[in-house]
Amino acid sequence: MSSSLKRFLIGKPLKSTELGEQKLGKLKALAILSSDALSSVAYGTEQILIVLATVGLVAFWYSLPIAIGVLVLLLALILSYRQIIYSYPHGGGAYVVSKNNLGVNAGLIAGGSLLVDYILTVAVSVSAGTDAITSAVPTLHNHNVFIAIILVIIITILNLRGVTESASVLAYPVYLFVLALVILIATGIYNVATGTTQITPPTPIGTVVPGITLFILLRAFSSGCSALTGVEAISNAIPNFKEPSDKNAAKTLVIMGTILAILFSGVTFLAYWYGITPRAEETVVSQLGSTIFGRNFIYYFIQATTALILVLAANTGFSAFPLLAYNLAADKFMPRMYLMRGDRLGYSNGIITLGLGSIILIIAFEGHTENLIPLYAVGVFIPFTLSQTGMIIKWIREKPKGWMLKLTANLIGAIITFIVLTIFFLTKFAQVWSVIVFLPIIVYFFHRINKHYESVGEQLRIDPTVEPPKIEGNVVIVPIAGITKVVDQSLNYAESIGDLVIALYVAFDKESELEMKRKWEKFRPTVRLKTVYSSYRSITKPILKMIDAIEHKAKENNHTVTVLIPQFVTKKNWHNFLHNQSSILLRFYLIHKKNVIVSTVPYHFQK
Amino acid sequence: MSSSLKRFLIGKPLKSTELGEQKLGKLKALAILSSDALSSVAYGTEQILIVLATVGLVAFWYSLPIAIGVLVLLLALILSYRQIIYSYPHGGGAYVVSKNNLGVNAGLIAGGSLLVDYILTVAVSVSAGTDAITSAVPTLHNHNVFIAIILVIIITILNLRGVTESASVLAYPVYLFVLALVILIATGIYNVATGTTQITPPTPIGTVVPGITLFILLRAFSSGCSALTGVEAISNAIPNFKEPSDKNAAKTLVIMGTILAILFSGVTFLAYWYGITPRAEETVVSQLGSTIFGRNFIYYFIQATTALILVLAANTGFSAFPLLAYNLAADKFMPRMYLMRGDRLGYSNGIITLGLGSIILIIAFEGHTENLIPLYAVGVFIPFTLSQTGMIIKWIREKPKGWMLKLTANLIGAIITFIVLTIFFLTKFAQVWSVIVFLPIIVYFFHRINKHYESVGEQLRIDPTVEPPKIEGNVVIVPIAGITKVVDQSLNYAESIGDLVIALYVAFDKESELEMKRKWEKFRPTVRLKTVYSSYRSITKPILKMIDAIEHKAKENNHTVTVLIPQFVTKKNWHNFLHNQSSILLRFYLIHKKNVIVSTVPYHFQK
């Protein structure tokens, strides 16, 4: 039943050879991998204005030069990641770049912060989208957490169905959002240009603002940089692209950068021109929409697609996280399970981990994940800075044709991202200090995992110089609870594989001990019966003790020790409750505490 | 760690030979086994008055003849259960009596309704006690369910520690409650007798009451009979008594009946004389206390001990339920696990089942278990009626000395309990119909369980006329994932026990299939390697398929099939996450779906 439910939700399994059909074309990839970056247009401008508002409305014209600064950084990031895509066409992005050029720990820091970041992205964006939904339908307001969890589960299932399928379903809202914002910006600029609107900017550009400081401007800039989160996703997910995957990924990156630049600068310019002030009850985009169109159909279209893209920003994480986890697992820094493709050829374990992780965050923060936003901006700018720096090292070391130009792009990128990172720590330390605590812990665990795998590899390697212990015979122990057909059959099997067979009986009182000895004489006088009296009514402990003694003697004679445990297999599941499961416990202890082989002899009940 | 937590909560295990020390003397047994019955004094009178109040205050004098009726029934029950104790000194009460004299189904109906009843008792009494506590400390009011669950857990742990230990702790409150009520009744009667109080009864005995009907009187009577629940507990728990257990149990029963009669008739008489009216906000006992003493220390003492005894009424169930479950399990109507004594010699599984069951009820009814009270009164009167009827049959059949007198006692008892039962169904059908639905279902499951055990016994019995299948050789299959030390050792063992060894390899692509074949030639050319290509990346399915084919052939030649599964045993628990657990899944499928022996070869990592 659980299997057919799985089929219904996930779809029928795909053959490994069908992998090519699961790859993404540019259009679908753009939708899936840019939803995170594009969704930040919905709040990027607002973040800048909120900081400037602390000085006064008069400072709002600064949003324009700040936006230009963000655009310069965007350009540097796009150029840099384009170069990363061509240099590391197998994906892995910041992790691989940092590891190869700056060393393992830099790579792990970049990889670790991105992994956590994708979990944060999913939690934050789904919560934000849920807020948008419940603002529209207030009766749902008390069910925020529940709705957010359902949304995460839906996105998880769509991604488990496979990347193309989720792309087909989730591409439309992304393009509709772009369309909605293009209509908004075009109409706004047309109105400004033709003078249709009577509105003029509240303060002209260049107005002297008393009280403005470099610190505030830098802070506003760093807040605006939150619009750039998600830019790195494509570099992590190159293997999801159709061949030639590097070229297609690079083109998609450039298209995404262009759209992002147009939308972000358009919204920022119009917000300045229309004198929009950030308000707690209404977003900047909503204010722009209602000023330009009034509350008509187009306004609601803009609002609806904005809510949708906030939810879908999560989907970018679902593409990038599993591939990043794969890369870390391939280098033995994460559990091996992240290497395996699921039924639908996606890395299911990564997808499920991401879904579960974000659900845990949503529950832990009761849906109020806004406080996590600074954390996740920091989480993105650490790998940004590391990967840019890594590329600088690469160019200096390899010096390919035209390397100076490439180095310049990365140098500018590295400097700006490092400044942004520093500003984040200086201005929002109270919200982001946990990064300094958790990132080293995560890196520590990566190393612990790696160490374990290395030591396992060593322990499992066959050493041709060492002769394996010789087996000169087998002792087979059969614990019995009575004289039944199962015991009979188990003893037959034991005699066929063993050189010495011992039956073990645990008695709870002296009478049953004597009675068993008497019965045994008639039943199987050829097999040795050992009985033990258990004064504490425990079965496992006396058996383990007796096996200890036998094992000791057997090892001396190069004999293996096998414990034969009969197990009832019931016809109906509920019948399991009717049988003592002490055999399962005994098996567990034997496997984990002793060096003996445990054989289970199933007895299938016919009814 | 979990083991030392268990030791801390439950105490060190006891030897089977220490069982005698866990038996109860009369004083402790009285406290443990009568708390349920005695606690009903706290609400029995009130139940009568509530029904009479529907006619008017003028009808309250009827509470006196009704109380006499209840006392007659109490006398009949005490005499009857005394005879049951002597006739069935091994306990089991109504279940054993009904089964032996009226047939298996009557026994199962009695036993089933008592089992459910004890679960109801625990839930209802703990909830009532919690209400009393949170009425006193209103800030706790929102945590009712939580507090009730904690109380159940505490009582469960005390009972798991052993019956004497729980008796030592829980006996004081019971005796303090008796003391409190004796003080209340003695002072009240002294006041009435000496005329210290000016109060006279509102309506003299014998006043003609317009509107009173037989139906209302019967209903009031049946409500008053709720004071008799718990009377049967001693007959179920005879094995818990010190030797001579039957004599001690019978004496305890008589003492309990006497105390119950005194307290119940005292409270009823005073309630009538002082003109107490049942009120939703204050119990009858509380009204009596504050009228007689005012709100002084003695009043609060009465209130506190009443709250305590309501909680402790649950404890009676914890003594009776496990022994009843034991009796049903001994007759193979309940899972065998109820036969086993735990570390502290109590029947732990019964204790835990009762605790869990009542916690589930408390959660399901969110602590409002009042509606379950009628249900649980019915659940007691069914076994009352059945056991009385059973005793009648017994006397008629056996005709021992003085049987006419004994028969008369049981006949009166049977008639009254049957009438009460009928009244319950007639007057409270809306609340008790579920008994008619669930009791047959429970009895049905008893039979299903019994049928399974019988059929298992049959299947396991050795039939000397049938020759067991001959074993002429062993085929050993070793699934492998690579060439490692573990595989090497497993193959050595396989060769030592098997006549034919086959290594199985599942490849996810054609290259690794070829490579494994090549490597194998160098590693173990003597062992046959079978490879299979799994296009869906599943390991279990192709292995099961191959084993199918091998099994078929082996069975034809009277060969057993053993599948050898290497299992990594990690040094640290968290390391388990780092290894694919496909071997566990494979083992599960093999045991449950195939008729092969599954051997686990542990490989213990050194670090």
Image (cartoon, coloured by chain):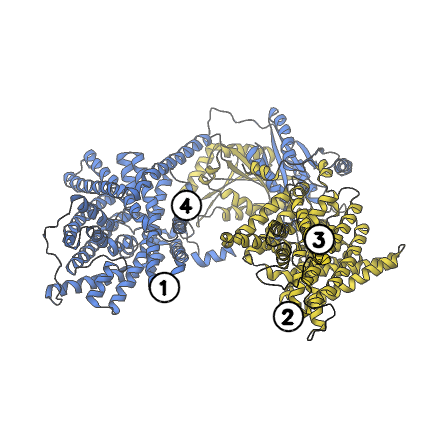
Chain colours: A blue, B yellow
Label 4: which residue?
A340
Say above or below: A437 vs A117. Answer: above
Return the x and y of residue B202 as percentages of the image width and height: 67, 67
Lower sequence index among marks 4 and 1: 1
Give x and y (percent) for residue A564: 63, 38
What SS does tag 2 mark? loop
Q: Position of residue A244 (x, y in %)?
A: 26, 49
Q: Amino acid at mark 3?
A: Ala
Say which amino acid is labelled 2: Thr
Q: Which mark is residue A138?
A: 1
Badge 2 density bin: few <14, some 14–19, many ≥20, Cα 10 Å: few
Q: CA distance from mark 4 to mark 1?
A: 43 Å
The chain that hosts pointer 3 is B
Other-residue count near label 1 (Cα within 10 Å), few / some / many at <14 / 14–19 / ≥20: few
Mark 1, secondary structure of its residue? helix
- Amino acid type, mark 1: Pro
